[in-house]
Structure formats: structure tokens, C-alpha cells
């Protein structure tokens, strides 16, 4: 082999290695992503999609290879998306559950976590909806991925119901924050998982005062949350069933710690919060909170530190809200861009995916 051939082969080998690294960032390895279930979704750096696997007590990172930037603006509407997915997957519409939605901040493509079937034998599916409304399946049989299993998952339910190991997720400053339940005494947990993933650690147990129940609680999981900075500190703004709104300092989420959240609003009993986003409009910040029984609430997000902690039994109190009359039947809610929200709504027996202006 002459010198020119040697350097040509060396350059080709180097280029191949660079391409392999570019194709699989963050120590992701190609192969089957063996999800047991697909629930909460969140996007991280470079279009990496995080999938909460409640049945497997794990979080998966998937490189869905969707990094082409898309301009903000435009709209998306897919009427009857549940029936379209059912037809695509060869199932009856009542055998399809859309568990969560997420918007890729780079491409603005929408991702859905879906269960094909009901119960423990349901098949997890990840779908992509592009800007034109075309639905396609993300192949899980051979995809760059990594995963981490929890060190402290809750025991399986004896009544056959799904244990709420994972209820909500977000990527914050190099960590995947995961709300749900653990097997600890403070079973309401927030886990902070460094990404790229390594060995899992225990979550932080969360204790809050529940205004409508009139007591401190440690077993109710956070239903939905958003990261938000106020008072010069990075916080988690968390919503619970029946419906306390609580702030929790991100810096307190150490493995195995017992953390006291601060309840700043009680939004009413008989209600389950579903999804929450924070946005800016007219120079002010707002929270939009979708609920099972109380519609979509709009709350002011500025000066949240000015509200006194709720530590006694109360009816609705603290941060005020208004109900957005034009948004009904909202099951999932995401920020699409600075002016638009994405909603999954139930209307007249159909499930629709569409964008709406931020109120």
C-alpha cells in the first residue's frame, strides 16, 4: 500500500466515524427501543424525543432524526385523528388511546404517544404528524436510543390498574425532570435524570399542602408541570388533582431528598389538571392550564412570588384565573410557537388535533 492509498483509506475511515457520531449523538445506540408502554413525552436538545415508559419504569431517549428547522407561523388541523390512527394501525377507534402530544421545537412536527389496544397487552406506538397533517409511524425496531430505569419504582397495583410511575416530563438544563410515584414513604416523586443517561438514582419525595383537602399530602403525584423562573430561582410550577398549584425549587430536587413545595393557588376540587404551558403576550407572561372538569384556565404568571403560601383549608384562592370559553374538550395542550398553541380536543364524538391562537 502506497502513502497516497493509506491516507485515502484513513480519511474515509475518519469520515465514516464522524458520520456515525453525527447520526447518533448523546451515546445513543441503534437497535430496538423495547418500550413496554408509551406515555408522557418531552423534547430535549437536537430534537431528541424523551418517552416515559410507565410499565417499564423507564425513560427512553429516541433520536427521531427530525432536526430540519421550520419557521414559526402557519396552522395545523387533523380532524378525526383518532379514526385516522385506528385505520392506519388496523384497529377499531375505541382500541386507540392517545396518551400524550409534543411539538418538536425545531421542525414543528407533532409527536403522539399511542396505545394500540387496552390494558397491559396494549402495544406502544410513536407517531409523527408533519406540518401538512400527514401521519407516519416512528419505527422503534431500529432507532438510535438509550434508556434509564428508575431505582425506586412503585409496586405494581394489585387491582390491575396502571400505576402512575410517570405522569409528566420536561427537559431542563441537561436533566430530564420526571413526575410520578416511587416506592418511598413520600411516594409523590420528582426525579432529575442527567442526560446523556447514566445509572438512575432515587427521586426526591414531595410534600405539599392541599387546600381543598385541608391537609399535607405526600402520596398524590404531580399531574402536570412546567419549568419557570421567578424570584431569581428556577422553579417547577406543578398542578395536582383537586387542584393545588405548587412551586418547587429545582435546586431542591436531590436524590432521596424530602422536599416541601409551596402551594400558591387552590383552583377547585373535583378536577384533574391535564397539561400546562407558559407563554408571553403583550409584554406579560401567562399560564394556560387544561383541565378535566374546569375547562382551560388562563392565569397571570408574573409576580407569582407575591402570593402567600396556602396552609389552611380553603375554597379557590391564591393566583386568580379566567376560563377560556372558546376552548372546550381539550385533552392535551402544547405550545406550538410564540403565538400559537396545539390542542388535542374531543368534539362531537371525534378527536381533533389543531392549532389555536394563544389567548
Image (cartoon, rainbow, N blue to C red):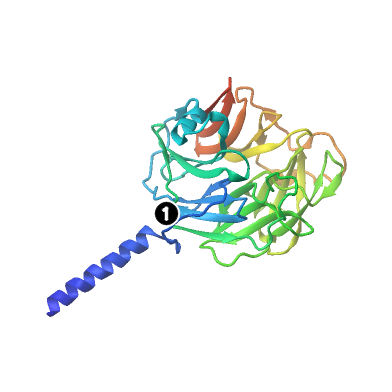
Location of residue 230 with respect to 324 vertically, above or below: below
User: Residue 73 versus residue 133: which sits nearer the camera?
Assistant: 133
The residue carrying mark 1 is 143
Circle 1 Cα neighbour tier, 10 Å, few/some/many (<14 / 14–19 / ≥20)? some
Specify whether residue 92 is in view.
Answer: yes
Rendering coords of residue 163 (x, y %): 69, 48
In the picture, residue 31 is in which quadrant?
A: bottom left
In the picture, residue 76 is in which quadrant?
A: top left
Residue furthest top in the image: 348
Q: Residue at x 68, y 45 (%)?
A: 162
Q: Quadrant of the C terminus?
A: top right
Location of residue 340 with respect to 42 vertically, above or below: above
Left or right side of 337 for 199:
right
Rendering coords of residue 3 (x, y %): 14, 79
Q: Determine whether the residue tagged by mark 1 lies in a helix, strand or loop.
A: loop
Q: Residue at x 45, y 55 (%)?
A: 32
Count of labels shown? 1
Q: Quadrant of the N terminus?
A: bottom left
Location of residue 250 with respect to 279 vertically, above or below: below
User: Residue 212 versus residue 15: which sits nearer the camera?
Assistant: 15
Rendering coords of residue 156 (x, y %): 71, 52
Q: Residue at x 85, y 37 (%)?
A: 314
Amino acid at each position: 500500500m502506497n502513502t497516497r492509498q493509506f491516507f485515502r483509506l484513513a480519511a474515509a475511515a475518519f469520515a465514516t466515524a464522524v458520520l456515525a457520531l453525527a447520526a447518533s449523538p448523546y451515546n445513543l445506540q441503534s437497535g430496538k427501543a423495547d418500550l413496554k408502554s408509551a406515555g408522557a413525552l418531552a423534547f430535549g436538545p437536537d430534537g431528541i424525543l424523551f418517552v416515559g415508559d410507565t410499565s417499564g419504569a423507564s425513560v427512553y431517549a429516541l433520536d427521531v432524526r427530525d432536526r430540519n428547522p421550520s419557521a414559526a407561523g402557519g396552522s395545523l388541523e387533523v380532524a378525526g385523528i383518532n379514526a385516522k390512527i385506528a385505520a392506519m394501525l388496523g384497529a377499531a377507534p375505541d382500541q386507540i388511546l392517545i396518551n400524550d402530544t409534543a411539538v418538536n421545537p425545531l421542525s414543528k412536527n407533532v409527536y403522539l404517544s399511542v396505545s394500540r389496544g387496552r390494558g397491559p397487552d396494549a402495544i406502544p406506538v410513536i407517531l409523527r404528524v408533519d406540518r401538512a397533517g400527514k401521519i407516519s409511524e416512528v419505527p422503534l425496531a431500529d432507532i438510535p436510543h438509550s434508556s434509564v430505569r428508575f431505582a425506586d419504582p412503585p409496586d405494581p397495583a394489585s387491582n390491575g390498574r396502571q400505576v402512575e410511575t410517570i405522569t409528566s416530563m420536561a427537559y431542563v438544563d441537561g436533566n430530564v425532570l420526571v413526575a410520578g410515584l416511587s416506592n418511598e414513604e413520600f411516594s409523590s416523586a420528582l426525579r432529575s435524570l442527567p442526560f446523556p443517561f447514566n445509572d438512575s438514582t432515587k427521586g426526591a419525595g414531595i410534600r405539599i399542602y392541599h387546600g381543598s383537602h385541608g391537609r399535607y399530602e405526600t402520596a398524590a403525584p404531580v399531574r402536570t408541570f412546567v419549568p419557570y423562573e421567578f424570584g431569581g430561582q428556577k422553579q417547577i410550577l406543578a398542578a395536582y388533582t383537586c387542584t393545588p398549584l405548587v412551586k418547587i425549587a429545582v435546586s431542591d430536587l436531590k436524590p432521596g431528598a424530602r422536599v416541601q413545595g409551596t402551594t400558591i393557588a387552590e383552583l377547585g376540587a373535583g378536577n384533574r389538571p391535564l397539561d400546562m404551558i407558559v407563554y408571553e403576550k403583550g409584554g406579560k407572561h401567562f399560564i394556560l392550564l387544561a383541565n378535566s372538569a374546569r375547562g382551560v384556565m388562563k392565569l397571570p404568571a408574573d409576580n407569582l412570588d407575591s402570593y402567600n403560601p396556602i396552609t389552611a383549608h380553603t375554597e379557590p384562592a391564591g393566583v386568580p384565573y379566567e376560563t377560556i370559553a372558546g376552548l372546550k374538550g381539550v385533552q392535551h395542550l402544547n405550545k406550538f410557537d410564540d403565538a400559537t398553541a396545539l390542542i388535542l380536543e374531543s368534539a362531537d364524538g371525534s378527536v381533533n388535533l389543531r392549532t389555536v391562537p394563544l389567548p
